[in-house]
Image (cartoon, rainbow, N blue to C red):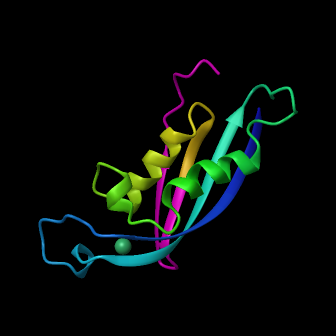
């Protein structure tokens, strides 16, 4: 099994829809650190799972310097973003860590127990 990890930094803004009082419902920004993990049994004709540049372009182009609420149709919590980014990099991505700040990190991990890869 081949595995790669790619770290991305995204500067963007979001506001959360919450059913309790929170300053996070106001528009605010983060410098998200996003770690994406890919794996594959086989490599493409270039000898890669996916070109690091293609991973970066796909995620950075969508989110960097954007208001995330304008580009997704879900509440952009770190957890929801982690799953969304993992889905964007299907079928190779199996885990995404989204760090909003030094102390706040959410992870999404795809359950691959039944995958035939
Ligand atoms: Zn936030």
Residue at point 33% right, 58% down? 70
Nearer to us in this view, 28 or 86: 28
| Quadrant position of the C terminus in the picture | top right
Q: Quadrant of the N terminus?
A: top right
Residue drawn where x is 63% and y is 62% of the image: 8
111 falls in the magenta region:
yes
Q: Residue at x 67, y 61 (%)?
A: 7
Image-quadrant location for residue 48: top right
Horizontal side of residue 62 vs 16, given as left or right: right
Is residue 17 inside the magenta stretch?
Answer: no
| Residue 47: quarter of image | top right
Outermost residue to the top: 116
Direction from residue 25 to residue 62 in the image, left or right: right
Q: Position of residue 116 (x, y in %)?
A: 60, 18
Tell me: 100 left or right of 10: left
Give x and y (percent) for residue 113. 53, 27
91 or 46, which lies in front?
46
Q: Which residues are magenta?
A: 97-117
């Amino acid at each position: 099994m081949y595995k790669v990890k790619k770290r991305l930094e995204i500067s963007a803004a979001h506001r959360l829809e919450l059913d309790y009082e929170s300053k996070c419902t106001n528009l605010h920004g983060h410098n998200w650190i996003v770690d994406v993990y890919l794996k594959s049994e086989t490599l493409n004709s270039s000898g890669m799972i996916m070109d690091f540049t293609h991973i970066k372009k796909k995620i950075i182009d969508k989110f960097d310097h954007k208001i995330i609420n304008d580009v997704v149709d879900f509440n952009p919590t770190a957890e929801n973003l982690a799953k969304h980014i993992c889905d964007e990099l299907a079928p190779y991505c199996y885990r995404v860590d989204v760090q909003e700040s030094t102390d706040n990190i959410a992870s999404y991990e795809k359950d691959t127990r039944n995958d035939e890869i």
